[in-house]
Amino acid sequence: MTTDDLSAPLGQDRPRKRRYRIPFTAPQAIAAGLGLFLVTFAGFATFNTNPMGGEPMAKVAYDPATLPGDKTPPKVAVPKEAAAAVKEGAAGQQTITIIDGTSGARQNVVIGTGADTPAQADAPPAVMANINPKLLESSRYGMIPVAAEGLKPFKVYAAGSDAERAAAAKKPTIAIVISGLGVGAAKTADAITKLPGAVSLAFTPYGSDPGKLVARARAQKHEVLLQIPMEPFDYPDNDPGPQTLLTTLPGDQNVDRLTWHMSRFQGYVGLANFMGSRFVATDAAMQPVIKEAAKRGLGWFDDGSSARSVAGVIAEGQAMPFAKANVSIDTVPTQAEIDRALTRLEALAREHGSAVGIASALPISIDRIAIWAKQLDSRGIMLVPLTTAMLKPKSS
């Protein structure tokens, strides 16, 4: 015990040394750090001049000697969308548009066409799935079909041979379309693998990877259609999905929505309505849509669900390939009713020379159609792709 301890007044502690304290709390330090990060990020986003920021990138191999002039080629960034815009050139070469990653300037570069070139390896599915690059046009949503150099998607992507079409002209024919594909992978796979190639397949634009399924369908010799969601009478209680074409929208806005749908995948011969009982019966709404499809070299398929549809009249005025379903095969999805509908299709084919049926991708529908198709030829009727039915002269 020290002298200070003995002399200190009772009941009072010894004076304590003052401790050093940090002038801010831990929560205040965290808040300051976050604030600094946000200020830095905002400055980068504001003053960064990269026009390709956020775009998907692909590497392209090229020969500097093919570039114009003697200048060293700039560093370039190639969006995958641009990689789809390949143009065929002479001597087995192709031209691809590349975009300067700093200025956004476009420049054409000649590349080789070997199967192992990086340009092909990194190309989007549309290029890899036997799609003619001449029949692609860039839009703000992606690549869409276009008629060019005397070629039309309707004819280029049609299934069947000239010999089969010649044979079909001499006997009754039936075309069948399976609709609503692309959303359920299992039912889509069943339709692709279990049904004969002459059955045409209609895909909605809403699948997670429709391009891959369409490529698989075309590899199995199926003809492909793109279904366009359209306004039904009970909309919006019954909503076909995003970007639905509406009678209340101006024509240019519906064409813009149509463009979005057409960019979802490639390789289809034509368009078809998905629902749309009100839309297909409204002439002012249908006119710009069908005219746009005709301009792009596509056919039109009416699912037959609306007796008031004006699609056929407008398509005829555009000299556009057209067909309308005569029979809905699985309105009542039982074996007996499906078989009865198929028998009715045969009777119509014998009476008029051709008939068209439509069905959904229900397991029972696929199974019954697959069994029926195997026996059809023995009854003197030919199963044909939809384009063959569209081109066959109609009898009364």
Image (spheres, rainbow, N blue to C red):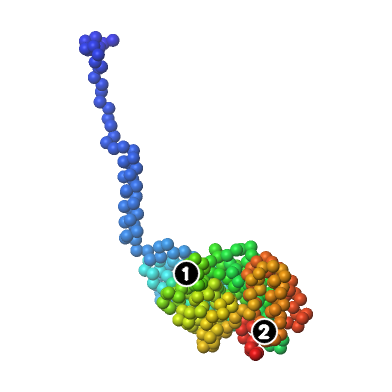
Q: Position of residue 16 (x, y in %)?
A: 26, 21
In x, y percent, where is residue 202? Answer: 59, 73
Instruction: Say left or right for 10 vs 316.
Output: left
The quadrant the C terminus occupies is: bottom right
Distance, label 2 to label 1, CA atoms, is 34 Å
Per the image, label 1 sits on a secondary structure element best described as loop
Q: Nearer the viewer, residue 299 or 39?
A: 299
Measured as percent of width and height from the top left, residue 198 is found at 67, 77
Choose top left, top right, bottom left or bottom right for residue 98: bottom left
Circle on res. 243: 1
Q: Residue at x 71, y 68 (%)?
A: 335
Residue at 43% x, 74% y is: 248
State the residue at coordinates (34%, 50%).
Answer: 37
Residue furthest out toward the right: 378
- Based on the displayed image, in which of its 4 quarters is residue 370 positioned? bottom right
297 relative position to 2: left or right: right
In the picture of the structure, the residue carrying the numbered disc 2 is: 354
The three-letter code of the residue at mark 2 reads Ser
10 Å crowding of disc 2: few (<14), some (14-19), many (20+) = many
In the rendering, at what x and y percent does residue 96 appear? 48, 74
How many marks are shown on the rendered structure? 2
172 horizontally vs 62: left or right: right
Q: Which mark is residue 271?
A: none
Q: Quadrant of the N terminus?
A: top left
Residue 73 vs residue 391, the one in the foreground: 391
